[in-house]
Amino acid sequence: MLEADAVLHFGTHGSLEFMPGKQMGMSGDCYPDSLIGNIPDLYYYAANNPSEATIAKRRGYATTISYLTPPAENAGLYKGLKELGELVGSYQTLRDNERATSIVKTIISTAVQVNLDKDVDLPDENAELTQAERDKVVGNVYRQLMEIESRLLPCGLHVIGKAPSAGEAVATLVNIASLDRDEEGIFGLPTIIAESLGRTMESIYRGSDLGVLEDVQLGQDITEAVRAAVGAMVRQLTNREGRVDLIERFGWIKKIFKFFGIQQKPAYLKALNKSGFKGLDEEKLVVLFDYLAFCLKQVCADLEMGSLIKALDGQYVLPGPGGDPIRNPNVLPSGKNIHALDPQSIPTKAAVMSAKVVVDRLIDRQKAENNGAYPETIACVLWGTDNIKTYGESLAQILWFVGVKPMPDSLGRINKLELISLEELGRPRIDVVVNCSGVFRDLFINQMALIDRAVKMAAEADEPLEMNYVRRHAKEQAEEMGVSIREAAQRVFSNASGSYSSNVNLAVENSSWGEESELQNMYLERKSFAFDSDNPGQMKQSKEISSPA
């Protein structure tokens, strides 16, 4: 028998906390309780995953110690995609030249070779195009290229107790600098740059989505300028080994300049000016870069190894919130005993505002791709981790699709809903089908009730069917199945209580299936348990409702 003084789990996640047994309040009959016994369970857990860390605490009795997730870097372009990017650059230089037509033909043929025609509508290679049509084709190709290039990939693995390299710090701070933080009064760097041009990032994004070549290029220029400015700031704090040491290089020279009253531009402002952006609001820049300097100190602070030693010595490990360090730098420094958030506090106002922008853009794109027709149903998956990271942004997106506004009570708990009028909404109510992970079900049962209530409110609203797809579909299902509209409007599904995952991945790995329909049936068998806010204590299997929905 193992006679260990403690168990140290590495990674996210193990199998102990997902063994059979109750969701919480373990008893002697539950596998996690029987397996861990009285041995202290110490658990290095990713700082951005408090939802599963909470399961490890509830079911595995774990003391979690957060570690910094590896920073994410842009994926970049390679081979044919890189060649295509160079062709787009050539077109921008020679768009008024007689060679522009042949360059566009080459762009179209190269785009087909790299399968970009699956994502972008391309004309025939030999079609006669006007300059405006050529610009639109090149703009759409460039937009798709930038979308591929800007996809985030993790930069390797984090080493416990090791400060990030300068490149890793820049990757993290670029993402932090790109977000507006209205509650703290901090403007994101892209917003500040766009304002200096008399534009908004929203208008630039919309133009880019429509393939406007100038807006696609401007968006890319702003992205590169943000990276250059943040890189200039971090380089001042980089040692010879390429790691951040928080002691400013050549600080003594700055002190001499200051003594003689010589004003010097900050490195980040020089970088922005060099990128071609001037007339920037320097007060907003100072606030932002002071905040980034604070974030850099938090990223480089090392509590990970010290917290483990404290835990092994039976000492107190400082608690702290988990979540996305980009959206919420208060998650840093890592090395804390993770806790999540109050489930009844989400979605926050900021999450609702962000969700509205995302949903409106998605609907606009769907309309553009479907000859102006609105999507009637959107399928969504809710994960516990994502909603803790974003403070309920995915949840708020679903409510905005349906056209329902979450409202706090007198104590700030989000437990009330208000149906937004069609006049204010300005579009039809979009139907939704929501599948919740087992972890989301365990942590956010109240939010599942919010979605169910929201859908039923929309289904029962006395509105024209052509402006309320929720009601139209619920009425059709109710008539087919001979049930009430409320029952037919069930749209929130998950696993049975105490069950996790669809197990489709296991069937694929073990080759234990013959036809695709078997995988579909397996998914429906495990993920078709409907949540009903009218009977919140039980989840009944409702394949007859989930399949048509």
Image (cartoon, rainbow, N blue to C red):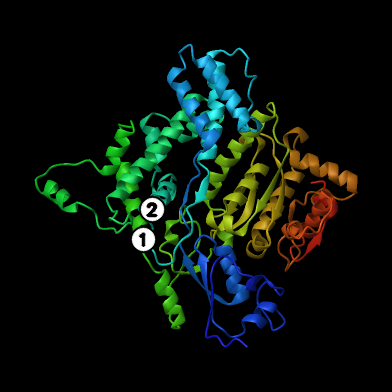
- Answer with the quarter of the image where residue 68 lies: bottom left
* Drawn side of residue 31 relative to residue 243, left or right: right
Residue 439 seen in the figure: yes
Q: Position of residue 222 (x, y in %)?
A: 41, 35
- Answer with the quarter of the image where residue 118 lies: top right
Mark 1 or mark 2: name the one nearer the start of the chain: 2
Q: Position of residue 388 (x, y in %)?
A: 55, 58
Q: Residues within 10 Å of mark 1 (few under 14, many from 20)?
A: many
Task: Report the amino acid beneath label 2.
Answer: Ala
Q: Position of residue 316 (x, y in %)?
A: 43, 79
* Drawn side of residue 299 relative to residue 364, left or right: left
Does the CB distance between marks 1 and 2 fall below 8 Å?
Answer: yes
Q: Residue at x 58, y 77 (%)?
A: 61
Please name the residue that numbered disc 2 is placed on: 169
Please name the residue that numbered disc 1 is placed on: 300
Q: Position of residue 212 (x, y in %)?
A: 52, 25
Residue 317 seen in the figure: no
* Drawn side of residue 388 relative to residue 547, left or right: left
The vertical placement of 229 against 132, above or below, is below
Task: Report the amino acid beneath label 1.
Answer: Cys
Q: Residue furthest front?
A: 79
